[in-house]
Amino acid sequence: MTTTIHNSQMIKHLVMKDWALMKKSIAAYMLAGIVTLGIMGMATAITFNIAAILMITLLIVIGARSAIESIVNEKKEQTLPFILSLPVTPQDYAFAKLLSNLVLYFVPWLILVLGMLVIIVSTPIYNGVIPLVILVSAYILAAYCCYLATALLTYSEGFTISVMIVTNLLLNGFIILIMRLPELNQTFEAATASWNATSLLILAALITFSAAILLLTGILQKRLTSFL
Amino acid sequence: MQNYAFEMRDVSIRYPHFSMENLNLSLLQGQVMGLVGVNGAGKSTTIRILMGLVKANAGEVKALGYDLPSQQVQAKYDIGFASDDMRLYKSQTLQWHMDFVQSIYPKFDSAYAKDLLKRFDLIADQKIKGISHGQRVKACLLLVLARRPKLLVLDEPTTGLDPVAREEVISELADILRDDERSVLFSSHNTHDIEKLSDQIAFLDKGKLLALQDKESYLESWGRFRCQVKDTASQSVVGAVSIIRHGQIAEVVTDQWSEGYAKQLQEAGFSVLEQHRMSLEEIFVANVKRSR
Amino acid sequence: MTFGLFLSSTDKKPMYLQIVEQITSKVMVGDWLADMPLPSIRELAASTQVSVITVKRAYLELERAGVIVTQPGKGSYVSTNSELNQELRKQEFEQHLAESINLAKQLQLSDDDIITCVKQHLGEHKSPK
């Protein structure tokens, strides 16, 4: 662990490298995100639903593409020998991958979620919708952590895509669940946002789950000794 | 007390269909070692173990005095690695890669890099996606050569290159010979390149070292004799790797050539008509055939 | 800068021998003069694109033949032996003779046949004056 911290210089280089590679894609996604927020800003029930679906799709796609591209493809496209010939250990490389993917997903995710909150608050859209938006976004983040972990630990396109499909199918179930829960759905139509024990519990569970998956991934990665 | 460019002692590794036991390979600083062997002999595996990309099951590995893989970060600052299955990022340009490498290595010589661009006939602003195999190989070599590393580890540096590109690469590699502190380990199917540039030859087959010797004495220990055979001639001769007979003429290959070997043959009933030195390629084939 | 050495990879002769012969002939014809410093081993290796060990061997052979002298720490120089030329030419003669005898043996000529042939040629050599 200590040597990884000492090699922070190289890890920074690797993270910056991933940023340079993903810059263009992220810019395109942010553009799509802004358009979606615009649609949401039109503040009718229909536009809100359309925007919600688009945003969910966008948040999923950003994660899916970056996990596959920057992790699985690095092995497929054989750029791994080039990177491992640099002054890094395989563990440094794995950690840098975890870090760069997390940051390069979390930042756009945060921006888009905050964007949605700003739109909701500043338009006639019921503020009661806020917990719903946050819970669904948190679920998507947790799902991302799952397939990020899969990609980092297996480098298999097959496994990663399977996990993606499963978590996304479950997303629908999750949305239906929270919309049906009586403690929650009565708050959604309200003009003000309100959290109660149930919604906070679900949020806490999602956050804890994501953190646990990431921590576990970090630990298991240390035990990988070769990629090639 | 001379320094070693690298040392591999009793290295063993086991894969489902391949294993290497107790490999002992080392090279003194300032020398060039050529690694020869058929596909699957273990050349790439050996190189990867040396580069810390693959962990051996047993044994000690040191490069430039650093323990591998525990000190691989320090080691890799002064080691340059390029392999023919190495790829660069398709969406980026060669210049991007050069900038990336320069940001990591303080010893990167950008003037020399520019010079190499010209000599290798490469375009810095071209995206990797659009370049040919040969240009890509040269690009990987450029990124490595421009750092002037103390140890160069190359896996098939000229394989698949056209004669012009090959000459460009060999020319740059030959330049390294000037520096007695720089060493090279390279594997190649172009036995010709190995024959010209190597000081030491390591011959691998099925994970075992068939030979590890300095090039001059190794080449000199092999010879091919065309002889006329009497019927009374013996079926085998001491030191003969192979004897092929067509009627009255026999071709004898030996790996224990000496000034007196022709006489030995005469005594065994083989009347020597001609004798030839063997090229490394011929030795390669004869040596591998023998162990099958 | 190849120092005027042209090494052929398709030549059957080993590389070190090509170096020895080419340097020897340069000295013989006077292109490389007595006391002239030879390029360092590594310099020659890099410019002719041959391994250091090959150049080392060539220099060793050249020293053995008396063509060059090596001073430890200073490098190698063309030797100043004034009879060097004579020696070199004699070596060349003996080499040609050995090759001719080899060829004769391949033709299955007997020792007497060979000597008769030599006498014939010596006779021809005397005539024109």
Image (cartoon, helix red, strand yellow):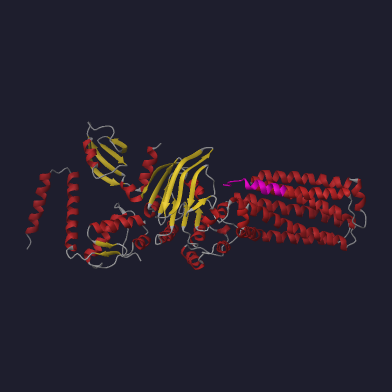
Q: Nearer the viewer, residue C4 or A136?
A: A136
Horizontal and vertical percent for residue A152?
A: 66, 48
Q: Which residues are magenta?
A: A213-228
Image side of residue A35 versus residue B195, left or right = right
Residue A113 occupies quadrant? bottom right
Image side of residue A158 versus residue C91, left or right = right
- The quadrant of the rendering that contains the N terminus of chain B is bottom left
**Helix, strand or loop: magenta stretch:** helix
- The quadrant of the rendering that contains the C terminus of chain B is top left
Image side of residue A205 versus residue A223, left or right = right
Residue A220: in magenta span? yes
Q: Nearer the viewer, residue B141 or A213?
A: A213
Q: Is residue B160 visible?
A: no
Q: Nearer the viewer, residue A78 or B198?
A: B198
Q: Residue at x 72, y 44 (%)?
A: A163
Horizontal and vertical percent for residue A125?
A: 89, 59
Q: Residue at x 10, y 48 (%)?
A: C115
Residue B188: in magenta span? no
Image side of residue C124 versus residue A55, left or right = left
Horizontal and vertical percent for residue A21?
A: 64, 59
Q: Is residue B201 visible?
A: yes
Horizontal and vertical percent for residue A80?
A: 58, 52
